[in-house]
């Protein structure tokens, strides 16, 4: 009997110990986890939660959006908690953010997504892409509504919000919301953006090095002011209609450029892998007469058109700075106004609303000697992301994956290569390839598209680098035609170039090596 009582007492103590252990394990989850609806009452500095609701699987519809011919593009989304909030870090701030939290199978990571041009809108498609991969995701409207820079006229705090503050504040608040909802902070945080989103990526790396473990900066608008000046400069030249190039002339120009420079990499494949080695002179296809070419002679350019081409390729020099021109091989992506329509509109808005405070300012007033420098003063200067000192970001362990298309007609890829070289010089003695790799894709246009391989797994590549230490020595990209892959090619870390091995199909990545 005594023995049984001893055993019972021992078992009782054991059960009590197990129960206590269970409490230790479970209580933190109960104490710090939260329901989606309870996030509506969450209080954080400078933030008001506008709504927090569970969205059932396949039930999300974009606010103000249309399903379109393809039906509901969000029908495959899993269930998630959608948090909508307003941030007011200054008296003139009105920053909208959304944080999407998977209801199940969260991968324990955060992905913040970027914007484009002057866009003041939540990036729903990008949020959806991140959610499909199991990420908690966040996006901001950068503090305004619409695609114009008019928000900045007379509102310096809103310009700061657009330049960098909205992205940082969004990131800080998203991490706090994640911590409250799941009961734990994200194990890894990533930024994924292209164009203006690439510029935002670099502002984060330069100004807030601890915000992200890994950053994808696609076709980054590093020299935002330089691009604005270049686009307006070319648009001014092309107010002379005789200096414009038709699609037929652009095709003739591109054909001549490829013929002159394609083989520089040792292989004739229709792609220019290293435009900086190209020595093409557009005068070689100038018409014999100085008159404008007739419709019957679309394979040659007039003298005025030749000067246009030279201007588009050439840097804009003003003061002690050069603003890069477009690269050889990008011709098919030009418009009759030279640089892309978006670049022209962005530049025009930049001058109207952030320099001259005059909504009626016209391109004809542009002064190529004096006006470029005016973009680099006051609030406007804060938009550029040209600081090459990435030492704090590298010291934090951050990894930067930058990519750009050599055929980009909107943001010159020469900005990316120049910046890469500047970082190397600034951090002389540091092996920057351990933390920063740039991939420039032959034939790729702005953020994708174009004649060359342009589709590749950016976030998966970055995950392998950040989480497993597997730095990308190459990234295999593909090109598709009519929905079918017709070419693959390795993208190489700049300044390496994909070089044909001398055997195998030139349409297959396995036939190339980076060197």
Image: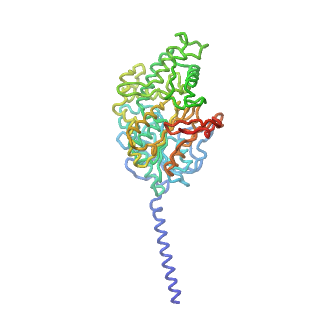
Q: Is residue 194 visible?
A: no
Give whichever of 495, 57 is nearer the camera. 495
**Is 252 left or right of 17, judged from the image as shown?**
right
Res. 432 image quadrant? top left
Residue 305 position, x and y percent, is 51, 17
Position of residue 425 in the picture relative to residue 72 (left or right): left
Q: Outermost residue, left direction?
A: 378
Colour mapping: rainbow
The location of residue 453, given as percent across then percent down, is 58, 35
Find the residue positioned furthest to the bottom.
Answer: 1
Residue placed most toward the observer, 38 or 299: 299
Instruction: Work out whether residue 229 or residue 36 is closer to the camera in this orientation and state it.
Output: 229
Q: Residue 368, position in %: x, y?
A: 39, 22
**Residue 142 in view in this figure:** yes
Q: Give the x, y percent position of residue 180.
A: 45, 55
Q: From this view, report whether residue 26 is shown above or below residue 383.
A: below
Q: Count the labels in the image.
A: 0
Task: Identify whether 481 is placed above or below 166.
Answer: above
Q: Residue at x 41, y 23 (%)?
A: 360
What is the quadrant of residue 421 in the picture?
top left
Q: Is residue 156 above or below residue 431?
A: above
């Amino acid at each position: 009997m005594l023995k049984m009582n001893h055993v019972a007492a021992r078992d009782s103590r054991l059960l009590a110990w197990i129960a206590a252990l269970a409490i230790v394990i479970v209580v933190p989850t109960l104490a710090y986890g939260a329901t989606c609806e309870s996030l509506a009452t969450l209080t954080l500095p400078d933030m008001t939660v506008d709504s927090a609701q569970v969205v059932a699987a396949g039930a999300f519809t974009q606010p103000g959006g249309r399903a379109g011919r393809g039906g509901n593009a969000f029908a495959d989304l899993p269930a998630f908690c959608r948090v909508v909030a307003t941030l007011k870090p200054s008296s003139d701030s009105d920053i909208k953010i959304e944080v999407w939290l998977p209801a199940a199978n969260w991968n324990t990571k955060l992905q913040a997504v970027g914007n484009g041009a002057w866009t003041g809108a939540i990036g729903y498609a990008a949020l959806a892409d991140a959610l499909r991969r199991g990420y908690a995701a966040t996006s901001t409207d950068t503090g305004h509504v619409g695609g114009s820079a008019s928000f900045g006229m007379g509102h310096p705090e809103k310009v700061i919000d657009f330049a960098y503050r909205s992205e940082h504040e969004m990131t800080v608040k998203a991490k706090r919301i994640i911590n409250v909802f799941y009961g734990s902070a994200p194990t890894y945080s990533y930024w994924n953006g292209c164009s203006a989103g690439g510029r935002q990526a670099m502002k984060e790396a330069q100004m807030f090095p601890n915000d992200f473990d890994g950053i994808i900066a696609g076709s980054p608008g590093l020299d935002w002011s330089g691009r604005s000046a270049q686009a307006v400069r070319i648009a001014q030249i092309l107010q002379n209609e005789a200096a414009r190039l038709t699609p037929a002339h652009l095709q003739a120009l591109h054909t001549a450029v490829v013929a002159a420079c394609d083989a520089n990499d040792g292989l004739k494949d229709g792609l220019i892998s290293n435009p900086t080695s190209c020595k093409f002179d557009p005068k070689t296809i100038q018409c014999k007469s100085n008159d404008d070419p007739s419709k019957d002679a679309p394979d040659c350019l007039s003298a005025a058109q030749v000067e246009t081409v030279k201007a588009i390729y050439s840097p804009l020099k003003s003061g002690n700075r050069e603003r890069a021109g477009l690269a050889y091989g990008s011709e098919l992506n030009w418009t009759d106004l030279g640089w892309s329509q978006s670049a022209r509109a962005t530049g025009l808005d930049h001058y109207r609303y952030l320099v001259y405070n005059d909504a009626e300012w016209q391109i004809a007033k542009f002064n190529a000697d004096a006006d470029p420098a005016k973009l680099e003063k006051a609030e406007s200067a804060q938009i550029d992301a040209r600081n090459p000192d990435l030492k704090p970001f590298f010291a934090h362990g951050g990894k930067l994956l930058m990519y750009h298309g050599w055929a980009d007609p909107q943001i010159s890829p020469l900005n990316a290569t120049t910046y890469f070289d500047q970082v190397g010089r600034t951090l002389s003695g540091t092996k920057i390839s351990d933390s920063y790799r740039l991939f420039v894709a032959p034939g790729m246009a702005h953020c994708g598209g174009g004649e060359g391989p342009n589709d590749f797994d950016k976030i998966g590549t970055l995950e392998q680098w950040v989480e497993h230490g597997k730095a990308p020595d190459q990234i295999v990209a593909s090109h598709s035609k009519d929905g079918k892959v017709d070419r693959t090619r390795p993208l190489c870390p700049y300044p390496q170039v994909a070089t044909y091995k001398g055997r195998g199909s030139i349409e297959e990545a396995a036939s190339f090596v980076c060197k």
